[in-house]
Image (cartoon, grey):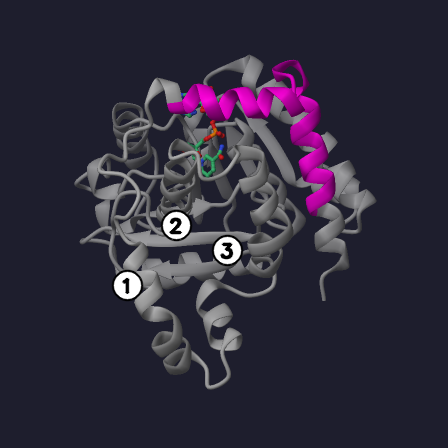
Amino acid sequence: VGHIGIFGAGSIGTAFALLFADASFAVRIYDPDPVALDRSKQMADLRATELRRFGLLASELAEVRDQIEFVSSASAAASGAILVQEAGPENVQAKQQIFSTLTSVTGPETILASSSSAIPSSRFADAGSAPRTLIGHPGNPPYLLRVVEVVGNPSTDEGVISQTGELYKRAGLTAVRVNREIDGFVFNRLQGAVLREAYGLVDADIIDPLDLDALVRDGLGLRWSVIGPFATSDLNVRGGIPAHAERMGPAYQRMVGQLRTSDEWTDALIAKVNSARRKVMPIEQWDEAVADRDVQLMKHLRARD
Ligand SMILES: NC(=O)c1ccc[n+]([C@@H]2O[C@H](COP(=O)([O-])OP(=O)(O)OC[C@H]3O[C@@H](n4cnc5c(N)ncnc54)[C@H](O)[C@@H]3O)[C@@H](O)[C@H]2O)c1
């Protein structure tokens, strides 16, 4: 059937390896840095054990381990793969170099998907393989936020887009099609829109950064963990979307552009948010806080229908 190749054994590459291995795909993961490859092996074990503990792993631990091969050669990982998931550094030059390597070590049967957070694939796809190149942008961490944005470039084959979506679905991900490439795709544009307003409100001293986080954590975010913003509008006003638009539309339109003339994240503004965060979480506790966030997410996922 062919295997899944992973390029880059950092946090995203390792996570994809886990997801595909748990869905019984044979996985070969490559990184030019032997230290990264070693770390990835440990991380995969640790994460799989945690997921198992919360009932979020479909296969047995040993099965997942057996499905992943850690390789130090690019062609060993990519050659003959049905899909290569690229998870290297987030910059155009690195991705251009990786995709030119991928083009030379794979044949037309291999789909080339990039995990890029914000760079459209037309900026780094190799001319020879652009029709089988696309974006598969995951949430972070991908085994907990089980969603992936599938975004073609103007030359991507329609069949490649649907086949990639199918492979992600088999790996337990909700594959969401983004119709046209755009910086940041949709996930990070939405995240950016919220951050733009959040920084604006803090800059204008309308709210404390920690209070803003509390509003999202206990309010908006809790609701968004079961339905999206359009479903929210549909359910918030009897009569659904048109009734909501009639009642709330003018108020939302008044808010546009009310706060700031510049969207710049100034040093002073960053310092203000940082100092609020440092009061509740010393930066030395960063790893612990990430682990704790993931435990909270696993508890939520376990409790979901
Ligand atoms: N971290 C996130 O929140 C997140 C979420 C979604 C998508 N992404 C995207 O996924 C990609 C990887 O992110 P990450 O957080 O795992 O980064 P990372 O820094 O943890 O890992 C990148 C890995 O790529 C390796 N690498 C460097 N050159 C390479 C090459 N030529 N070939 C193969 N591997 C190479 C590095 O050694 C490193 O291990 C980026 O494009 C990032 O934007 C990240």
Q: Earlier in the sequence, mark 3 or mark 1?
A: 1
Establish whether ligand 1 lies closer than 8 Å to the Cβ of label 3.
no
Instruction: Give the image location of residue 166, x and y in percent.
Output: 47, 62
Callout 2, which amino acid? Leu
Mark 2 crowd level (few <14, some 14–19, many ≥20, 10 Å Cα): few
Q: Earlier in the sequence, mark 1 or mark 2?
A: 1
Mark 3 crowd level (few <14, some 14–19, many ≥20, 10 Å Cα): many
Callout 3, which amino acid? Tyr
- In the picture, the quarter occupied by the C terminus is bottom right
Instruction: Give the image location of residue 88, x and y in percent.
Output: 41, 28
Who is closer to the viewer here, 303 or 247? 247
Residue stretch rendered in magenta on the structure: 269-297
Residue 190 badge: 2
Cα gap from disc 3 to disc 2, whole angstroms: 22 Å
Q: Which residue is mark 1?
A: 158
Cα gap from disc 3 to disc 1, whole angstroms: 16 Å
Residue 168 badge: 3
Residue in view at x 47 percent, y 28 percent: 8
Q: Earlier in the sequence, mark 3 or mark 2?
A: 3
The secondary element bearing badge 2 is classed as helix
Mark 1 crowd level (few <14, some 14–19, many ≥20, 10 Å Cα): few
Q: Determine whether, in the image, residue 272 is placed left or right of residue 154.
A: right
Callout 1, which amino acid? Glu
